[in-house]
Amino acid sequence: MVKKVDPEDSNVSSRQTITTIFAFIALVFIFKILWSLTIPDLFPGAVEQGLIVDTLTWWTAIKISLFVTLIMGLASWTQGGGAFRFKE
């Protein structure tokens, strides 16, 4: 039996995908901006010694954004959004 595809379902799915992509790009920009605004002020000695960079590269901002996205996804998944739920 062939399943009919509802056009509204594919529109919702594509909108969610586009929204997710834009949210991730915004997260990358937010990390780059917040890092350059806060880290040099919080750790001026470490920045001067070269222990901490004062600005992030795009690649590092993307990696941090992926890490935060995964952590947030796991946190919401364990809160009841996923297949496994922790019973108290």
Image (cartoon, rainbow, N blue to C red):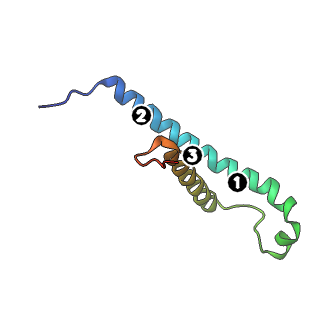
Q: Which residue is denoted by mark 3 in the rendering? A: 24
Q: Where is residue 39 in the image (x, y as percent from the top left)?
A: 80, 60
Task: Kindly give the residue lying farthest to the left in the view shown.
Answer: 1
Number of numbered discs on residues: 3
Instruction: Check disc 2: other Cα within 10 Å, few if <14, some if 14-19, many if 20+.
Output: few
The answer to whether 66 is drawn above or below residue 18 in the figure is: below
- Of residues 47 and 85, the one drawn nearer to the viewer in this rendering: 85
Q: Is residue 31 left or right of residue 7?
A: right
* Amino acid at dot 1: Lys
The answer to whether 9 is drawn above or below residue 81 in the figure is: above
Q: In this view, does 61 lie to the left or right of 44?
A: left
Taking the spot 11% from the left edge, 31% from the top edge, the residue there is 1
Q: Earlier in the sequence, mark 1 or mark 3?
A: 3
The answer to whether 78 is drawn above or below residue 40 in the figure is: above
Q: Where is residue 29 in the image (x, y as percent from the top left)?
A: 66, 48
C-alpha span from label 1 to label 3: 13 Å
* Amino acid at dot 3: Phe
Residue 32 numbered mark, or none: 1
